Amino acid sequence: MSCPLPFQADSVKMARDVTRSTLDDWGLTELTDDATLVVSELVTNAVRYARGNREITLLLVRAAPHVVLAVADPSDEAPLPKKPDFCSENGRGLYIVETYSQRWGWDPLSGGGKAVWALFSADS
């Protein structure tokens, strides 16, 4: 499933809604809380760090026994995890992605930009 998102803060809510409804359609509601939290962080990072007016894209792939969530954005800059500062209001995004997903990573896209992804185990 692929969903283009506008390059704006409202995209975070849209990405959560799409993720929630897709997982529900797939019968994987047990993943909803963790997956929507991770997708929120990935889209927030894309909007915050990939400045510009191009779209970002949310991808959800079910490849049993896994679900992969990915966010593609126009930035070529690699996502770098920071040591989380739990008193700060930001800087914890990739820590949250790492904590709530089974695995995460990123890949450059052939036309420029990157896709940051998170893997979840789906036992259904």
Image (cartoon, rainbow, N blue to C red):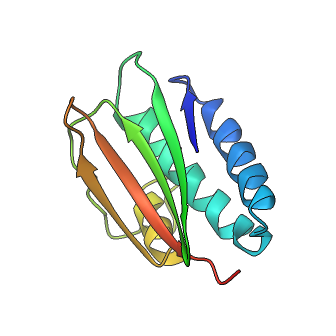
User: What residue occupies the far front of the structure in this picture?
Assistant: 64
Picture coordinates of residue 9, whole percent (x, y): 59, 30
Q: Nearer the viewer, residue 20 or 78?
A: 20
Vertical relation: 51 (above or below) 60: above
Drawn side of residue 120 relative to residue 29, left or right: left
Name the residue at 35% across, 36% down: 49
Drawn side of residue 14 relative to residue 116, left or right: right
For the image, the number of numbered tags is 0
Name the residue at 64% across, 42% down: 15
Name the residue at 74% across, 62% down: 26
Vertical relation: 21 (above or below) 28: above
Name the residue at 46% across, 31% down: 56
Q: Quadrant of the N terminus?
A: top right
Picture coordinates of residue 61, whole percent (x, y): 53, 56
Q: Nearer the viewer, residue 30 or 99?
A: 30
User: What residue occupies the far top of the structure in this picture?
Assistant: 53
